[in-house]
Image (tube, rainbow, N blue to C red):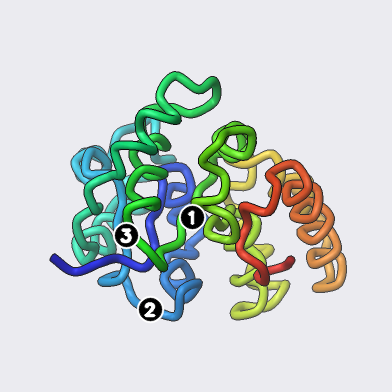
């Protein structure tokens, strides 16, 4: 079975899809969609284009095409599952992803769940994940490098209310310079890094 280099949670994928940043996602590990994996329960929901997940069916279709290229999520490390089971702030999906991350040396997790990151940082499993997690704001930083301020701003603003941090950084109107966006992303990332005890991958705005 092919081993993925990037594991992805539902929240990060949904935001990337709505912001038309799907092609940026695998570049965060210098790979392609064939180097990625997601939760096995997610693709069927994307196929159904569930209304509570998608603002428009076209977003679901674009995501479905990419998910068809992904590989199977590795089996989780059962010791990690036991250690994190029942921890407040870690839902079943994040539990499975962190378990798979622990079982996949060299892989990185892209997640939009900040509550889970803060919770994991307080557990005895922290050393298994240090510098192995990327958040949505790091995806936005990567996209800023690739697309530039004007293009990224237009994409994010189309569905900005889906993410309150992005809304605060990008705003609803008026031009934001590249410097403005980098300052906003950097400020948030350094704050999150301090809260999560070094979980975040270095670079991508850090």
Q: Which residue is mark 1?
A: 110
Query: If you read the primary sequence from the N terminus, does the residue marked by circle 2 or circle 1 appear first?
Result: 2
Instruction: Tell me if I can see residue 23 in this picture.
Output: yes
Q: Quadrant of the C terminus?
A: bottom right
Q: Residue at x 72, y 72 (%)?
A: 149
Residue found at x 48% / y 49%: 12
**Residue 31, above or below 205:** below
**Front-most of residues 141 and 154:** 141
Q: Is residue 85 above or below residue 191?
A: above
Q: Quadrant of residue 116?
A: top right
Residue matched to label 2:
31
Q: Nearer the viewer, residue 78 or 195?
A: 78
Q: Residue at x 54, y 20 (%)?
A: 88
Residue 23 at what x, y percent from top left?
A: 42, 71
> Is 71 left, or right, of 181 in this rendering?
left
Q: Secondary structure at mark 1?
A: strand
Q: Is residue 173 left or right of residue 134?
A: right
| Labels 2, 3: front one | 2
Indicate the position of residue 194 as horizontal and vertical percent values.
Answer: 78, 47
Q: Can you say which quadrant of the picture contains the N terminus?
A: bottom left
> Circle 3 sits on which residue?
62
State how far apart marks 1 and 3 are (Cα): 19 Å
Residue visible at 21% across and 66% down? 69
Disc 2 from disc 1: Cα separation:
14 Å
Task: Reply above or below: 102 against 28.
Answer: above
The numbered mark, 2 or 3, whose residue comes first in the sequence reads 2
Determine whether the residue tagged by mark 2 lies in a helix, strand or loop: loop
Is the residue marked by circle 1 packed among few (<14), some (14-19), or many (20+) residues within 10 Å?
Answer: many
Mark 3 nearby-residue class (10 Å; few <14, some 14–19, many ≥20): some
Whether residue 170 is visible: no
């Amino acid at each position: 079975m092919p081993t993925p280099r990037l594991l992805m949670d539902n929240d990060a994928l949904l935001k990337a899809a709505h912001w038309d940043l799907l092609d940026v996602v695998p570049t965060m590990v210098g790979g392609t969609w064939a180097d990625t994996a997601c939760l096995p329960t997610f693709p069927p929901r994307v196929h159904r284009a569930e209304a509570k997940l998608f603002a428009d069916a076209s977003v679901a279709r674009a995501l479905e095409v990419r998910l068809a290229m992904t590989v199977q999520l590795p089996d989780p490390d059962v010791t990690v599952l036991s250690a994190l089971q029942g921890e407040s702030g870690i839902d079943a999906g994040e539990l499975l992803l962190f378990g798979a991350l622990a079982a996949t040396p060299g892989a990185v997790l892209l997640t939009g769940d900040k509550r889970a990151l803060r919770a994991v940082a307080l557990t005895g499993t922290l050393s298994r994940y240090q510098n192995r997690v990327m958040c949505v704001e790091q995806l936005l930083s990567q996209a800023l490098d690739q697309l530039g301020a004007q293009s990224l701003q237009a994409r994010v603003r189309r569905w900005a209310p889906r993410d309150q941090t992005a809304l605060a950084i990008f705003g609803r109107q008026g031009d934001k310079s590249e410097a403005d966006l980098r300052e906003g992303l950097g400020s948030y990332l350094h704050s999150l890094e301090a809260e999560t005890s070094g979980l975040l991958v270095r670079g991508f705005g850090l």
